[in-house]
């Protein structure tokens, strides 16, 4: 769990990540960061998702749980 959170913090250039927030609620969130997360999922976790898929998560914590249970 710590690795995916660290990866997200690096992409968003933040030191802490509110796990109860949605990506779209973060001031750092933009289309470039969305593409970076999509690329990270594919290259590091073997998970393919699109931008619309990212928006469906109710929180970052929900997203992290998805990654942990879906990785190959």
Image (spheres, rainbow, N blue to C red):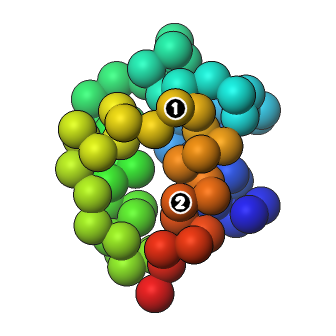
Q: Position of residue 47 (x, y in %)?
A: 36, 71
Residue shown at 68%/51% (left/top)?
5
Q: How many marks?
A: 2
Single out the residue that lies furthest toward the bottom. Answer: 72
Would residue 58 appear left or right of 5 to someone viewing this image? Answer: left
Query: Does the rendering let one see residue 41?
Result: yes
Q: Residues within 10 Å of mark 1 (few under 14, many from 20)?
A: few
User: Between 37 and 49, which is closer to the camera in this rendering?
Assistant: 49
User: Between 41 and 64, which is closer to the camera in this rendering?
Assistant: 64
Q: Position of residue 61 (x, y in %)?
A: 66, 43
Residue shown at 40%/50% (left/top)?
37
Residue shown at 41%/62% (left/top)?
40
The Cα atoms of the two marked residues, 2 and 1, are separated by: 11 Å
User: Between 52 and 17, which is closer to the camera in this rendering?
Assistant: 52
Look at the numbered disc 1 and give the secondary structure of its residue. loop
Q: Position of residue 17 (x, y in %)?
A: 71, 33
Would residue 43 appear left or right of 48 to someone viewing this image? Answer: right
Look at the numbered disc 2 and give the secondary structure of its residue. helix
Q: Position of residue 2 (x, y in %)?
A: 77, 61
**Contact flag, marks 2 and 1 (Cβ < 8 Å):** no
Would residue 44 appear left or right of 30 to someone viewing this image? Answer: right
Give the residue at mark 1: 58
Q: Classify residue 42 by image quadrant.
A: bottom left
In the rendered image, the vertical position of residue 24 relative to residue 36, given as above or below = above
Q: Residues within 10 Å of mark 2 (few under 14, many from 20)?
A: few
Query: Does the rendering let one see residue 13?
Result: no
Give the residue at mark 2: 66
Point out the image quarter for the N terminus: bottom right
Earlier in the chain: of badge 2 and badge 1, it is 1
Q: Classify residue 54 by image quadrant.
A: top left
């Amino acid at each position: 769990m710590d690795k995916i959170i660290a990866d997200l913090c690096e992409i968003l250039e933040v030191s802490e990540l509110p796990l109860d927030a949605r990506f779209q609620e973060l001031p750092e969130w933009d289309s470039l960061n969305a593409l970076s997360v999509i690329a990270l999922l594919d290259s590091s976790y073997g998970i393919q998702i699109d931008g619309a898929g990212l928006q469906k998560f109710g929180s970052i914590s929900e997203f992290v749980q998805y990654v942990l249970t879906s990785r190959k």
